[in-house]
Amino acid sequence: MNLKANVNGHKICDALSDPTRTRILKYLIQAYPEAKTINEIEKVLPKPVSATTISFHLKKLREAGLIVTDGHKKGLEPPIKR
């Protein structure tokens, strides 16, 4: 097995193992192609989650390659090929 693929697979599994992260990712996919901000993400979560905690979850999703930051819109979106 390719070591790089194994590491990436582990990052993806780790990122998706948390219910808050899966909820955030689902929201971003449903909103695509519109990028969303942390404040918009905060409003759709079922319980109060601080911006700091959301940032932590977004970092995990980014590290796994599941989302990207759009520098122009200052938002987040899934890395879907256009």
Image (tube, grey):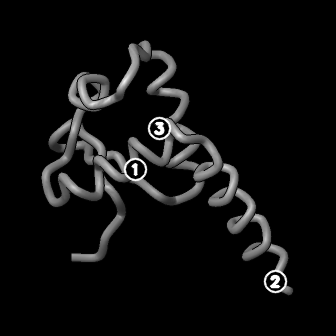
How crowded pointer 1 is (Cα within 10 Å; few <14, some 14-19, many 20+) is rated as many
Where is residue 2, by image quadrant? Answer: bottom right
In the image, 70: left or right of 58?
left
Q: Three-letter amino acid code at disc 2? A: Asn
Q: Which residue is drawn at 70% across and 68% down?
A: 9
Q: In which quarter of the image is the N terminus?
A: bottom right
Q: Residue furthest bottom?
A: 1
Q: Mark 1 points at which residue?
A: 25
> Label 2 to label 3, Cα distance in Å?
26 Å
Q: Name the residue under label 2.
A: 2
Label 3 close to label 1 by CB (< 8 Å): no
Q: Is residue 10 above or below residue 57?
A: below
Across and down, in percent, residue 65 comes to 52, 59
Across and down, in percent, residue 73 comes to 15, 41
In the image, 49: left or right of 61?
left
Residue 58's disc is: 3
Q: Could you say which is closer to the camera, residue 8 or residue 74?
A: 8
